[in-house]
Image (tube, helix red, strand yellow):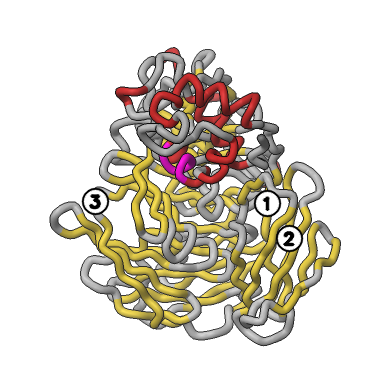
Amino acid sequence: MPTSQSYSRAGLLTAVVSASLMWGCEGEPQDELVPTPTSSAARLPEDMEALEGAPDCVDLEGSEGLTAVSPEGFAWLAQEHGEGQTRVRVVDPSDLGLTSTHEVDLSSLASARAWSGADASLAADGTVWRLDDFSRVRLTSPVDDLSSASVCGTLDQDGFVLTREGLFERRGSSWWGWDPSLGEDEAPSMILARQGECVGPDQTLWATSEDGVLWGVDIADGSAARRARFGDLIDASATARDVAIIDGAVLWIGSPTELDSWRAWDVGVVGATRLSSNTDSVWIQTEGALLRWSQGEWSALSLPAGQSPTSMLAYESGVWWTTPEQLCHQRVGAGVRVDGFRPFGRTQDESLTLHISVLEGQEAPSVDLGGQPLDALDAQDGGWLVQAPLESLGWHTVSITTAQGTRDLSVERLPLPERSWEQDIQPIYEVNCSECHGGPDALSTDLSTHGAWVQAADRIQAFVVDTQSMPPPASKKDGWSSADVDMIEQWIAGAREP
């Protein structure tokens, strides 16, 4: 059985200020209780399917490195230069000649999650940021030192930050923290994100520690457990259902909650060094090829003679990798781009509107939701519009099939809090906002009515919820709390009832 620790939550407005606010540990698990998979390592298949098509490559510029890839395949290359700036070049997977270059006033980039060709979440310069169309928005940070942070999620309303000081979860406007009270090598140090998001249908955040332990944090009940130990952990990644681990010369893949499901392959002969995953596939970087494991089947992407990859990141419809001189890309799978929602995303909406672009061919994709067919309507722009009703709470799977294959999109529908202006927002306004925003003669924008709040909702979201710059520090009342911010955020996200 895996060893576990429990915690209790307490809200943090900006940063952890006391150990009593952290998730409380009830004793330290003993190492001998952490299980280790025991299957014998099989040889890799000698007759792997060869992935078709020739990769496309472009030259790297200067000291660029592959920093992030969005769920739809936009590659982010970054290089820091003088005066606290980072040059970011974004490459479109459909045409590597389509690039955009931006100067971002950030440096000391610790971790990045790209969401599109212009939006990302970052840990840099000691805090967390959101890039909206490359305009940076500074967010509240849970701690001061983010130099070795690992992040997932958007970080403005949800997400996790993992640092030397602990694991911190963003829920609405507040940070919640967990301090496992363990040594530096024992504590989790790397989040295994799912296409940038934190959890999948198993409702578990997976992370690894320097001493080779696979940790699972159940976000529903708050339990944290050491699920397995590996003696020489080199890299790890997670699909929707499985976790993959390079443990010395052995590759392990299996369900982290079912130790008997783990399978092992000897990868010492191919020199496996790095892993990257999408919803249903694990990519393995080796000395002369990229290997792909997808639902039990193996395939291989052979690289030109003498080409050895230096980094690799997979996404839903392909894989990017770098060599010392070039950035390369290979499309694999269904060959579709989906706009309107991200893999493993969460929403309170009762339906999704998806725009689907088929990258090869003109035929309409076949789309279903949990086995029920959905209509794909011509969007008159070369793509297809699909309305996906989410009739029940919980996880749903949208499957998109083309001549090249099938792609699954997992989405969770969340309950919608019922908030109203009169019962929930007006009391907060009267205590905290009315002095400056009360009536037509107010010192600033009038927020004295329900209609005024509806009209200013986007600005309130930006200043009160996202950046928490309002109310200004000098005007904050003693009773102002994260609960007020959460209430306002829920009212904005909901129906904005009077």
Which residue lies most toward the left here?
82
Q: Is residue 82 left or right of residue 228?
A: left
Give the answer, above or below, for where 311 lies relative to 30.
below
Amino acid beneath label 3? Ser
The answer to if 453 sits in the magenta stretch is: no
Instruction: Specify the segment rendered in magenta.
Output: 459-463
Front-lying residue, 311 or 128: 128
For marks 1 and 3 on the same chain, the one whose residue lies earlier in the sequence: 3
Residue drawn at 45 percent across, 15 percent down:
479
Residue drawn at 40 percent across, 68 percent down:
287
Which residue lies most toward the right here?
372
Reading the image, the residue beneath label 1 is 411
For marks 3 and 2 on the same chain, the one whose residue lies earlier in the sequence: 3
Local secondary structure at mark 2: strand
Local secondary structure at mark 1: strand
Residue 398 numbered tag = 2
